[in-house]
Image (cartoon, grey):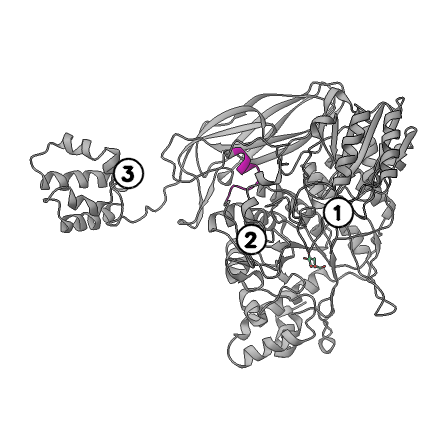
Amino acid sequence: MDIKALLAKMTLEEKASLCSGMDSWHTQAIERLGIPSIMVADGPHGLRKELPLENPNDPVNTLEAVCFPTGGTIACSFDRDQMRAMGKALAASCKAEGVSVLLGPAANIKRSPLCGRNFEYLSEDPYLTGELAAEYISAVESEGVGTSLKHFAANNQETRRMTVSAEIDPRTFREIYLAGFETAVKKGKPSTLMCSYNKINGTYSSENHHLLTEILRDEWGFDGLVMSDWGAVNLRPKGVQAGLDLEMPTSYGQNDAEIVKAVRSGQLDEKYVDLAAERVLRLVYDLLPSPEETAVFHREQQHQLAGELAKESLVLLKNQDNILPLNPSQSIAFIGKFAESPRYQGGGSSHINSFKVTGALQAAREICQIQYAQGYQTEADETDEALLQEAIRTAQQADVAVLFVGLPDAFESESYDRTHMSMPQCQNRLIQEVCKVQSNVVIVLHNGAPVEMPWEPSVKGILEAYLGGQAVGQAEAELLFGLANPCGRLAETIPLQLSHNPSFLNFPGEGDRVEYKEGIFVGYRYYDKKELPVRYPFGFGLSYTTFEYSNLSLDKTQMKDTDTLKVTVQVKNTGSRAGKEVVQLYTSSLPGHQKKAIRPVQELKGFQKIHLEPGEEKTVTFLLDKRSFAYYDPQLADWNVETGTYQIRVGKSSRELLLFQNVEITSSPRPADPLTMESTVGDFVEHPQVKQLLLQAFAQAEPGKTFEELSAMLSSSYVLQTPIHTLCNFDSHITLDLLRQLVEKANTLL
Ligand code: BGC
């Protein structure tokens, strides 16, 4: 299709009409020119395709589909292959259903555990987020289905999400909130991005030229289409100029008319409309479903896959006295409504109409006899005394009680944030009461984001199932009974209590302003720097087997920041079961040099999940580059690695690092900051030639002093911190004129 030629035939009105949806889920068709329309659908962890209604007043009806583990859950697999498998399956269902663009993945950073959409988001860490999102994207796109990486950017809360301004400093924005998107764009190559509702430093994402054009296209090389989140458009012509190609859903022609008006009145150059229309056309013709398409949506197969993905993602947090795996010959009680009807997905636009759901009770009863008591209700946070008493009796009579608890639907969803991190009090009470009569208690948690666990010391086992998709019960049963070995790792920190979270003082902000005052110290970057104890650290998760790490080696111990460092480590399964280990690599900028940038203690820069049979050993290789050590320097407007010693740390979690090696890195020469009258003596003497100049000038002004005396003076910490202009107060011979000449000359030597 010759897009340019097609564009040339279009009127301004037609081009403007392409810049918004035809309805909620389709791009605009133009009959006169035979331009077809394509369909988009949510995403991200299942296909949510709206079906036409027979009667316009009927409630929304969506296709019966498969709900995979949500983003926050599958991220705990720490496994690119699992993301890929999910992406491939989603693409197949899209193709079978004529959906051209799947609205996902959602790659915002979990700034606060309270964000209502954390269940969809991947992690508190941008590296993990970027790697996993890229894999999902490339898997879907490789099947000829488009993705929409969302919500670009800084949509880290639901409170006033359509009007709030996220106030973020440039370094934090790049290092924490954009880095995941950057990797996903560069590696995954999505066909589209979806801009967020919120403002960033006062400008709506939907009309943010810096974000949508300068960063996304000019710096990262993105050449696809940007669509708005549903209803995220403020001033449409401004958006077109900023790089927002497609408004979704339809605005019933109103914003298209605004575009036409802006062009006719000279406020908007038509070239921007051409560009947006061209991108829409490219998307449509690239992703138009083929009439010969034969893909089939194999729901049963995908249900099995959903269970497999959940097995790879659930995290075993506690296993005191090896309470797990359960022994099927014991008498076992399952307690809690979520055993029978699990909470396995979140509310809002990602809500899937699951064609079936497998709960743990159903799956476990295939393995052995299980006693069951409902224990609590989910409609309101009130203890139902009859249910509680029944649960206590059931638990008391068993050898082990497994309690399926967590957050009911109403506690967390798109559109609102939680205001606390507690589980329903009726469930906390149930756990306490059961613990009084039963010493062998295992908790299985169903929740989209962390909860406080006041009962943690009294229970022996905790399996974090998050929102594990529609086959979560199958995975839970297999993990609990040891038919599978747990291998998920936390993609976020679980703090002891909400008030320990770094965003606590500034979430969700005041009115329409939320200041990200914790800066780069998000998640483990904060807890580690503050040396705070946490309930469970980032990267943590237990297994039924044990792993030993040895022989961490680097292919060099000195390098330039432009070099690549190869790191290898050996990992051995020293237990008696096959299992998977997530080998994690963190880098740390060691103190001791003249450091200017404040850095986190350590940052995740590599992970690999490996399968090991008992006794088996594998060598894991990581390749590190400049970005593995860099921070974003706003003055330089670029990533920078300061010269110094960096440590490579490898191990099982952010708080269980086992092997360490150092590497010396030399920074690439960078243009020096110009010296001014406000620069300190220290700034001057950093440059050897400038130091000589300074000494010579002082020697002339003060002939009585020896060179050594002057040199000593220039190295006292008091003088080093003194601005050059202040030296005129030191001695009448050091005149302002002399200092001004010095500054001028010094700048020629940099
Ligand atoms: C959500 C998006 C979603 C869109 C379409 C919006 O409210 O923020 O994530 O893709 O609706 O349902």
Position above or below: 235 against 697: below
Residue 688 shows up from this direction: no
Nearer to the camera, 702 or 535: 535
Q: Which residue carries the number 2 mark?
A: 509
| Residue, disc 1 | 88
- Looking at the figure, which quarter contains the N terminus? bottom right
Return the x and y of residue 699 as percentages of the image width and height: 11, 38
Residue 607, above or below 142 = above
Q: Is residue 251 above or below residue 49?
A: below
Q: How many marks?
A: 3
Q: Position of residue 28 (x, y in %)?
A: 71, 70
Q: Residue at x 13, y 48 (%)?
A: 735
Residue kind at label 2, given as amino acid type: Gly
Magenta stretch encompasses residue 281: no
Q: Nearer the viewer, mark 3 or mark 1?
A: 3
Q: Amino acid at mark 3?
A: Glu
Which residue: 78% across, 47% down? Answer: 89
Residue marked by disc 3: 686
Q: Is residue 527 in the magenta section?
A: yes
Counting from the top left corner in percent of width and height, residue 109 is at 60, 46
Residue placed most toward the observer, 100 or 555: 100
Crowd class of label 1 (few under 14; some 14 to 19; many from 20; radius 10 Å): many
Mark 3 element type: loop
Q: Mark 3 to mark 1: distance in Å?
A: 55 Å
The amino acid type found where label 1 is placed reads Lys
Boundaries of the magenta span: 520-528
